[in-house]
Every structure is written in structure tokens, then in C-alpha cells.
Image (cartoon, grey):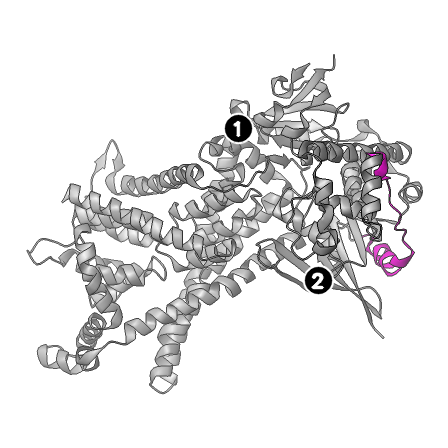
């Protein structure tokens, strides 16, 4: 299990756990929930923000937020 | 008899909600602000049939009823306030075919409030291409509602929607999920305490940090007991609620929605590969910007010149056709040029918003935000600040208006406050004449000094914007916690109707809101320049004629005007100002120009032209006139020291009442424009002072 910001570009993973209190509810409502699939589409220069596909949503979040989401790689 | 019903449009951003609104209402819409805040309120009227009219509110885009921005809390306040005149008889949740799941989250929340709610599935034209098929009748049954399949692009399905709206009374208002299943004890107690209240509504009131000033405050004020649950606990319950809703939705979608991924053509990933590339992404963005600003300058200059000459000849016409008198002068020299000063900005505003709305409609804007966020965050700004900062090089007014899509209030405020530092087009005439006057010809490694100076001034403007943003971000104590979550929407072709309405609305609101203030100040400046105390002003003609008996005709008239101006209120103000600005290297005439150019910076040149009694205002003549101006000790007034000091003063000073007016409008208070006025002016003074003292 690794924090989301350590995912490499193009990798797919499953959300394992989230630190609820550190995350905006909005992110959770957009599908950032344990069990859902997540993939990293692109990192901006300096690896921040991250462009993700979470469940059905395409969105960008900052690295500081991504550190509170833990994922497991899909082999 | 005609009936009227209230309809509220809801939906995630980028679902085409506004397109549905535009299709239903056309141009019979009205955009204002919600009282006390700067969130746009869009309303319109739509005829459903011969006897029924619908009053439609296009609510700000929201992902759920748990507010995280001012825009979203507007939505909740309306839906919770049964006493509001806008409270909807029926709510319409608009979703696009691709983000059905996420929009259904919002749908279940709205429906759980007990408001009749129907679903619009927009962008139906995309279904085939994306390989999506939906079993509409089954979905209707499972959600216990009615669904209209709509394509706003092809103008299809809106008849069905109108029909459904007319029959809204048949919609079920049964809740979709049972809140009790989240925490049986908690919700049982809640029900016991407020037996007459709707459960989900209570829950929303407890969990929102929204300002429920007028809404049912008395009746649910005792909910404090239920807040004793620690905040993390409440948040966990909210999360549980979200999970419950998704379980409900996923269960339904499994039976009703089929997505055939193979048939989907992936425009997104192909475009993203170039548009947000680590290197090419920036190059493309830079090229797009250059194109936009070139066209803003080029295309606007033609209508702007036309506006300029039209208003000039209008003034001329009024003067020659109306009888002489105060009223004629006020009209010809105060009101008409004042109106001209408003209208002249329209081409730039319209062009800028034409481009911005196209970039937004296509989905490209989110990519820019993604690319720029990291760099700008260092200065307390946001990826979304990039558009205002760069539009500021054309004009700060549309730029300040363009800050509206920054959700975080602190970052938005900082962006508004620093945008006027960027070099706007009105500074150009001032720079042009001063550079020509004081910067020597010649070149340094092939770059000519004058061009370098101009570039330096642009860079200094940007640099100061970033520096002051950084300082403000460290000093402003504003709690506005908001997270950076930016949706990256699909790429699509812009809808011309949406673009047109945006351009029209932005332009209209500038003319009506900021225009009023600009007009008022123009008139004030005119009064101050046209009246003066004492006989020096009143008998200017006589005094000049006897003192300069050799002058005749035009030359005499301009001399009289100059003398009169010197003794008008504004002239006296310039003289009063002289001791303050002498250390910067200016005299009282420049003082007058500084004051009057408050109407618009480029007025500086025109004012000096009047004062120096130049007949024609061709730049060359003013330039020569300025070059011959001397101080009391015989040295030229405009030398390197005073010239650079003056240019830097214009680079930093808040010399523009129109910008102040728009900042007042956007921040809804005089506090911020005043801070801007004094902060920037003091900074400009200090820098101009030290520059002059160093160089002189």
C-alpha cells in the first residue's frame, strides 16, 4: 500500500483507505472512496498537481491532498 | 388564467446545465447577484404552454448539497428555504451521459429533501460515439422519477422536458435512501426531537457550515445537541451517507447502464498528450495567449478609434447645435466624454470574454489551471489566477471580472488586488511619449534602449504583481479553507449560443455597474476643471488678453484656456499637490495631469496637451512642447531622472477609477478598492521618489 502521490504515470490502482479528515468531502463525493479504481494520467512539472481518473471522474488535485489517499497497485 | 411555477436547475459543473437553461429561456434571462455576495444569479422565463409560465433559476454548478464554496451554499440556502419567493415547485437535475453516476448523487440528495425532482440526461447525441446505452424506463422506475433525454447541441428532447415540467405534480417525493441506516440511534433521536421536520433537511442543517441566517433558524436552532457529536464523527457520518448513496446508485446503474468502452473514441487522451505536455503544453498555451492578446489589441483598436471619434464629434455637434451655457458644456465636456470613456472599453471586454468563454467551453481552461497551479501557488495565487494576470495586460477591468472562477476567496481577492500592477494598454500612450522624450536613441547588443525600457516596464509590472501577491498571502488573515479539486472535463466544441450570452452578459454588467461610477467621476473632474474660485478664473479672458496683447485667434483662445485651467479647482489642487510631488521631479502641471488621468491613464497625454496650450494633440507636437519645458533653474523638466520616476509612478500607482469601480463591484465593499488605491499609490510614490533622488 502506497500513498497516491507515489504512483507513477499511467499506473492503475485501487483505493485502499483514505484519511477522511484531511480530504474535502467533495473529493469523496466525486468517487474517491475505498474500493474504487484510480489511475494517474499525468503529473504537472515538479510532480504537482496530479491529474487523475477516479472512478468515472477526471480531476486534478494537489500533491498535499494526494498524500492522504492510500492505494494498492493493480498488477 | 395564466399560472406560474418555479423551477430550479441543478447539476455538476460542465454538464451543460447552462445550455439547457439557455435553450429554455433564450434571451429572456436576467443575471444579477445574490444579495450581499458576488455569486451570479441567473433567472429566466420560459413558456411551457399557452397558460403556464415557468420562472427558472439556473443555480451555480455543484457536485453535492454539502457546500464547500460560496456558489454551492447558494444552492443549499435556496433549497432549504421554503419561504423564499424562488423556492422551487420542481427541481431539475441536469446530468451528462458520461457522468451519470456522479450527478445521480446530487439527484438523490435533492429528491431526499422532498422536492419533486426530475432528471435531464444531456448530451444524448454523444451516447453512440461513447458507446453508452441507458435503459431509460427502467432507470425511471428505479429512481422513482421521470427522465428527459436531451441534446442541447441538436436542440432535441426539450419538448419532452417541457411536458414533464407541466406534470410535475405527478412526481414522487419519496426519499431514495433511508438515513437511519447510517446511524440508527442518532437519527432516531433526531426524529424524536423534531417530529415535524424532514429528516434529511435536519441533517443538512446540522452538517453544513452554511450561513443559515434567515432559514428556519428558530425552529431548528436546538440542533446544537446533535452537534455535540465531534466534528470528525459528523464527517464520518457524511462519508457513510455518501457511500450509502453510491451503493444505491451503483445497484441501479448495474441494471440500466451499459458502457461499451471499445467503441469509445478517446479524444481526451490524445489531446491531453499534447496540451498538457511538460514542455509543449506551455508552448501551446503561450502561443494561444499571444494570439488572444494580439487580436484583442488589433481587433479592438478599430472599433475603439471609431468610438473615440464618434464621441468626439458628438461633443462637437452638441456644442455647435445647442445654445451656449452650463448645460451644454456639462453635456459636451462632462457627460459625453464620460460615456465615451465607458463605451471605449466595450470592444476589449467583449473580445476577451469571447476568447475566455471559448477556452472554458472547450475544456481547455482546466488544463491551463493544471499547468500553472504549481508555479503560481508559490506566490499565494492559484492556477486559475493566470487568466486575470495575463488579461491585465490588455485592461484590468475585464481581468478583475475574470477572477470569478477562483473558488478560494483569499486567492481570488489577492488576484484582484495585484492584477492592476500588470501593464495595461492605457499605460502605453504614457510610456510611449515619456520613453521617446527621455530615453536616448541607440542600442545595446542590437536591442534598442527604448524597446528595452518598455520591456523593462512590463516585467516590472508582472514582478510587482507576484511580489505583492506573495506579501499579501503572508499578511492577509483570511480563513478560507478550500481544497484544490479541479475537474478536467471532456473536450468539446463550444456552443455559440453559450459564448454569445456570456459575452453579452459580461459587457452589459460592466456598462451598467462600473459605468455608473465612471460617469460620476468624469462629471466631477469636469466640474473641477470648469470652475474655479476668485477673479483669476472668472476674468481669465480679460487678464490674458491684456497681458498677452500680441496673441490672436487660436493662440489667444488656448492661452486663455490654459490660464483658466491653472486657476480652476483642479489647477489649484495641482498647485497644492506641488510640494508633495516636487521631490519626485514633477511640477504642478504634471500634478494636474496625475489627477485628471485618474479618469483613465491615457488622459495624461491629453491633459498635458491642454495645459501646454498645444493646438493639435499629435504626439510629436506635445513631445516637442514637453521637451522645451524648463524648471525655474533653466534645466529641462523632463530629463532621465524625472522621466523614469514618472514612468515608474504610472507602473505602480492605482491611477484608474474604472478599475476601482469594478473592484468595488467584485468585492462588494469599498474596503478593498481603498486599500488598493492607498497601498499602490504609496508604493508608487516611494519608488518614484527614490528613483528620482538617485538619478537626479
Task: Identify the residue shown where x is 33% and y is 58%.
Answer: B602
Residue B164 within the magenta-colored segment of the rendering: yes
Subunit that carries the residue with mark 1: B
Q: Relative to B170, say whether B269 is above or below.
A: above
Q: Assess disc 2: are there few (<14), some (14-19) or many (≥20) residues with their C-alpha within 10 Å of its C-alpha.
A: many
- Could you say where residue A64 lies in the image, as x and y percent from the top left? 57, 26
Residue found at the very far bottom of the displayed protein = B323
Q: Assess disc 1: are there few (<14), some (14-19) or many (≥20) residues with their C-alpha within 10 Å of its C-alpha.
A: few
Callout 2: SS:
strand
Sequence order check, earlier mark of 2 and 1: 2
* Image position of B387 (left or right of B561): right
Q: Quadrant of residue B84?
A: bottom right
Residue found at the very far left of the displayed protein = B633
Regarding residue B5, the answer to whether it shows in the image is yes
Regarding residue B249, the answer to whether it shows in the image is no
Task: Kindly identify which residue carries mark 2.
Answer: B44
Q: Nearer the viewer, mark 2 or mark 1?
A: 2
Q: Quadrant of the image for the N terminus of chain B?
A: bottom right
Callout 1: SS:
helix
Q: Quadrant of residue B3?
A: bottom right
Q: Quadrant of residue B536?
A: bottom left
Residue B280 is marked as: 1
Subunit that carries the residue with mark 2: B
Residue B477 within the magenta-colored segment of the rendering: no
Work out whether residue B641 or residue B275 is closer to the camera in this orientation and state it.
Answer: B641
- Could you say where residue B173 lies in the image, as x and y percent from the top left? 88, 51
* Image position of B121 (left or right of B141): left
- Could you say where residue B311 lies in the image, as x and y percent from the top left? 41, 70
Q: Relative to B627, say whether B383 is above or below.
A: above
Report the span colored magenta: B156-183
Residues at discs 2 and 1 in contact (Cβ within 8 Å): no
Amino acid at each position: 500500500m502506497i500513498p497516491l502521490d507515489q504512483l507513477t504515470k499511467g499506473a492503475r490502482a485501487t483505493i485502499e483507505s483514505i484519511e477522511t479528515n484531511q480530504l474535502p468531502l467533495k473529493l469523496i463525493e466525486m468517487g474517491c472512496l475505498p474500493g474504487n479504481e484510480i489511475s494517474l494520467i499525468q503529473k504537472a512539472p515538479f510532480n504537482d498537481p496530479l491529474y487523475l481518473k477516479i472512478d468515472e471522474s477526471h480531476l486534478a488535485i494537489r500533491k498535499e491532498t494526494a498524500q492522504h489517499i492510500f492505494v494498492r497497485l493493480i498488477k | 388564467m395564466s399560472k406560474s411555477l418555479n423551477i430550479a436547475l441543478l447539476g455538476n459543473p460542465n454538464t451543460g446545465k447552462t445550455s439547457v437553461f439557455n435553450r429554455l429561456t433564450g434571451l429572456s434571462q436576467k443575471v444579477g447577484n445574490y444579495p450581499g455576495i458576488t455569486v451570479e444569479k441567473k433567472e429566466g422565463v420560459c413558456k411551457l404552454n399557452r397558460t403556464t409560465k415557468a420562472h427558472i433559476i439556473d443555480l451555480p454548478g455543484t457536485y453535492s448539497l454539502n457546500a464547500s464554496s460560496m456558489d454551492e451554499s447558494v444552492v443549499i440556502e435556496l433549497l432549504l428555504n421554503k419561504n423564499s419567493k424562488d423556492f422551487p415547485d420542481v427541481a431539475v437535475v441536469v446530468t451528462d451521459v458520461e457522468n451519470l453516476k456522479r450527478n445521480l448523487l446530487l439527484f438523490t440528495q435533492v429528491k431526499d429533501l422532498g422536492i419533486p425532482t426530475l432528471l435531464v440526461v444531456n448530451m444524448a447525441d454523444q451516447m453512440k460515439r461513447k458507446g453508452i446505452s441507458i435503459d431509460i424506463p427502467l432507470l425511471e422506475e428505479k429512481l422513482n422519477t421521470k427522465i428527459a433525454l436531451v441534446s442541447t447541441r441538436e436542440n432535441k428532447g426539450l419538448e419532452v422536458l417541457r411536458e414533464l415540467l407541466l406534470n410535475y405534480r405527478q412526481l414522487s417525493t419519496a426519499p431514495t435512501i433511508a438515513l437511519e441506516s447510517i446511524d440508527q440511534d442518532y437519527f432516531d433521536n433526531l426524529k424524536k426531537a423534531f417530529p415535524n421536520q424532514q429528516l434529511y433537511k435536519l441533517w443538512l442543517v446540522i452538517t453544513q457550515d452554511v450561513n443559515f441566517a434567515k432559514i428556519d433558524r428558530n425552529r431548528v436552532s436546538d440542533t446544537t445537541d446533535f452537534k455535540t457529536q465531534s466534528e470528525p464523527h459528523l464527517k464520518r457520518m457524511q462519508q457513510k451517507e455518501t457511500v450509502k448513496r453510491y451503493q444505491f446508485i451503483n445497484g441501479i446503474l448495474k441494471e440500466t447502464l451499459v458502457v461499451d468502452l471499445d467503441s469509445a473514441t478517446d479524444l481526451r487522451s490524445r489531446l491531453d498528450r499534447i496540451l498538457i505536455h511538460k514542455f509543449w503544453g506551455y508552448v501551446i498555451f503561450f502561443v494561444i495567449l499571444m494570439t488572444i492578446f494580439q487580436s484583442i489589441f488589433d481587433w479592438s483598436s478599430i472599433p475603439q478609434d471609431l468610438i473615440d471619434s464618434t464621441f468626439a464629434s458628438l461633443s462637437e455637434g452638441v456644442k455647435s447645435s445647442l445654445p451656449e451655457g452650463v448645460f451644454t458644456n456639462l453635456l459636451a465636456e462632462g457627460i459625453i466624454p464620460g460615456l465615451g470613456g465607458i463605451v471605449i472599453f466595450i470592444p476589449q471586454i467583449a473580445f476577451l470574454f469571447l476568447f475566455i468563454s471559448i477556452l472554458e467551453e472547450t475544456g481547455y481552461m482546466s488544463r491551463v489551471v493544471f499547468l500553472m497551479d504549481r508555479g503560481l501557488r508559490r506566490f499565494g495565487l492559484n492556477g486559475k489566477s493566470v487568466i486575470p494576470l495575463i488579461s491585465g495586460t490588455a485592461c484590468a477591468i475585464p481581468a478583475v471580472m475574470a477572477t470569478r472562477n477562483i473558488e478560494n476567496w483569499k486567492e481570488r481577492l489577492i488576484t484582484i488586488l495585484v492584477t492592476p500592477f500588470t501593464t495595461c494598454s492605457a499605460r502605453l500612450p504614457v510610456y510611449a511619449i515619456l520613453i521617446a522624450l527621455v530615453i536616448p536613441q541607440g542600442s545595446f547588443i542590437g536591442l534598442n534602449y527604448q524597446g528595452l525600457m518598455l520591456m523593462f516596464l512590463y516585467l516590472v509590472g508582472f514582478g510587482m504583481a507576484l511580489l505583492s501577491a506573495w506579501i499579501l498571502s503572508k499578511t492577509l488573515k483570511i480563513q478560507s479553507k478550500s481544497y484544490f479539486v479541479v475537474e478536467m472535463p471532456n473536450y468539446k466544441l463550444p456552443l455559440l449560443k453559450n459564448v454569445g450570452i456570456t459575452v453579452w452578459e459580461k459587457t452589459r454588467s460592466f456598462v451598467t455597474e462600473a459605468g455608473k461610477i465612471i460617469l460620476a467621476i468624469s462629471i466631477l473632474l469636469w466640474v473641477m476643471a470648469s470652475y474655479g474660485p476668485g477673479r483669476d478664473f472668472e476674468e481669465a479672458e480679460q487678464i490674458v488678453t491684456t497681458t498677452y496683447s500680441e496673441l490672436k485667434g487660436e493662440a489667444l483662445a488656448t492661452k486663455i484656456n490654459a490660464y483658466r485651467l491653472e486657476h480652476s479647482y483642479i489647477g489649484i489642487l495641482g498647485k497644492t499637490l506641488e510640494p508633495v510631488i516636487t521631490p519626485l521631479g514633477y511640477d504642478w502641471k504634471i500634478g494636474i495631469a496625475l489627477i485628471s488621468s485618474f479618469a483613465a491613464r491615457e488622459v495624461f497625454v491629453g491633459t498635458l496637451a491642454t495645459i501646454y496650450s498645444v493646438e493639435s494633440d499629435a504626439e510629436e507636437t506635445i513631445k516637442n512642447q514637453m521637451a522645451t519645458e524648463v524648471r525655474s533653474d533653466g534645466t529641462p523638466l523632463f530629463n532621465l531622472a524625472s522621466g523614469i520616476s514618472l514612468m515608474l509612478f504610472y507602473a505602480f500607482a492605482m491611477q484608474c477609477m474604472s478599475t476601482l469601480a469594478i473592484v468595488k463591484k467584485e468585492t462588494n465593499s469599498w474596503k478593498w478598492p481603498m486599500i488598493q488605491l492607498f497601498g499602490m499609490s504609496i508604493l508608487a510614490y516611494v519608488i518614484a521618489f527614490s528613483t528620482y533622488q538617485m538619478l537626479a
